[in-house]
Image: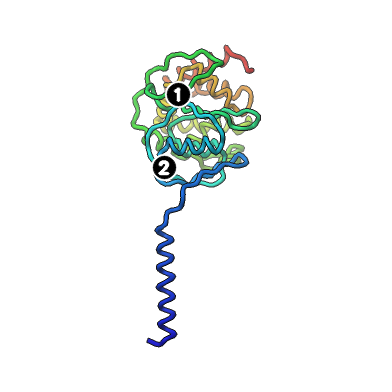
């Protein structure tokens, strides 16, 4: 082999080795929050640790508990609520804001064995039994099923979004037309896919009606948004148990005027 050829081959081998070493080096876990946007890139991180990292980055107070599972997820600078929806899946949560900043994160979807959120503003009732459903992973998969969106809501969430994100939009969107689009999309999905209604009900049932009413109202993007959504469920939900739960929460909302 000529000297020049040998040198070129050696360089190729060295570069290949270096590239291979870099490919095998895992990226460090990353959790960042700035300007209302969350960035998360983690591999097999325990969910409770990830929530603690997010709480530290956002300065929110966490109430409740989460299931023990590892999370591998990667997204960059998306809205905090949307990022949490991707992380939690079926494990429902509520964000409470004050002065435009997130203050508390209440974890709701843990069933009767989880830690119930507390609220000094309302009297707490006993949680009702959790309806039968598949395990948490199946619920998470159900609430990640995509739905097609159009109109004002598609400007906020895109033309396709997980049903879990659309559920949050029924209350959290500030634009009335976007909320109406979210309600129609969710209720249509529940009719065509009854498992979505069952999965959503399973996140509401463990939470006392008064607590759920307070959380829906404090996370609303506009006055009356919580009442709009509960009314839509009462009149249009295909699941009788879901209609009953919504009616109970709506009664609380109507008995406690906006503050």
The residue drawn where x is 39% and y is 44% is 44
Q: Residue furthest bottom?
A: 2
Q: Nearer the viewer, residue 236 or 175?
A: 175
Q: Place residue 122 in its image quadrant.
A: top right
**Where, by quadrant of the figure, is residue 141 drawn?**
top left
Image quadrant occupied by the C terminus:
top right
Q: Picture coordinates of residue 163 (x, y %)?
A: 48, 35
Residue at the location (43% across, 31% down)?
Answer: 91
Say the numbered circle drawn on residue 204: 1
Tell us which disc is closer to us: 1 or 2: 2
Residue at x 49% of width, y 29% of height = 93
Q: Local crowd at mark 2 within 10 Å, few (<14), some, or many (≥20)?
A: some
Horizontal side, residue 21 vs residue 254: left or right: left
Can you tell which quarter of the image residue 6 is in?
A: bottom left
Name the foreground residue: 223 vs 191. Answer: 223
Q: Which residue is mark 2?
A: 45
Locate the N terminus by quadrant.
bottom left
Q: Secondary structure at mark 2?
A: strand
**Is any atom of residue 152 visible in this view?**
yes
Q: How is the image coloured?
A: rainbow
- Secondary structure beneath disc 1? helix
> Residue at the spot x=62%, y=41% of the render?
35
Q: Nearer the viewer, residue 117 or 89?
A: 117
Q: Can the viewer see residue 234 in this picture? A: no
**Mark 1–mark 2 CB contact (< 8 Å):** no
Mark 1 Cα within 10 Å, few/some/many (few <14, many 20+)?
many
Residue 247 position in % (x across, y down): 49, 16
């Amino acid at each position: 082999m000529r000297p020049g050829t040998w040198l070129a081959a050696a360089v190729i081998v060295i570069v290949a080795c270096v590239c291979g070493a870099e490919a095998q080096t895992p990226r460090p876990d990353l959790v960042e929050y700035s300007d209302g946007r969350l960035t998360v890139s983690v591999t097999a991180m325990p969910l409770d640790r990830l929530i603690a990292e997010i709480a530290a980055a956002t300065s929110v107070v966490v109430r409740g508990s989460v299931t023990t599972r590892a999370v591998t997820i990667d997204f960059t600078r998306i809205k905090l609520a949307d990022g949490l929806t991707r992380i939690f899946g079926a494990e429902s949560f509520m964000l409470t804001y004050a002065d435009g900043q997130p203050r508390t994160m209440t974890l709701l979807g843990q069933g009767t064995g989880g830690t119930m959120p507390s609220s000094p503003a309302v009297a707490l009732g006993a949680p009702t039994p959790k309806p039968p459903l598949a395990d948490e992973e199946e619920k998470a998969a159900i609430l990640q099923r995509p739905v097609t969106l159009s109109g004002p809501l598609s400007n906020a969430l895109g033309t396709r979004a997980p049903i879990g994100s659309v559920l949050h939009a029924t209350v959290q969107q500030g634009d009335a037309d976007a909320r109406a689009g979210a309600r129609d999309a969710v209720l249509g999905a529940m009719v065509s896919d009854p498992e979505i209604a069952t999965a959503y009900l399973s996140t509401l049932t463990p939470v006392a009606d008064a607590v759920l009413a307070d959380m829906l109202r404090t996370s609303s993007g506009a006055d009356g948004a919580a009442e709009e959504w509960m009314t839509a469920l009462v009149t249009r939900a295909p699941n009788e148990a879901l209609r009953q739960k919504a009616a109970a929460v709506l009664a609380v909302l109507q008995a406690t005027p906006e503050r």
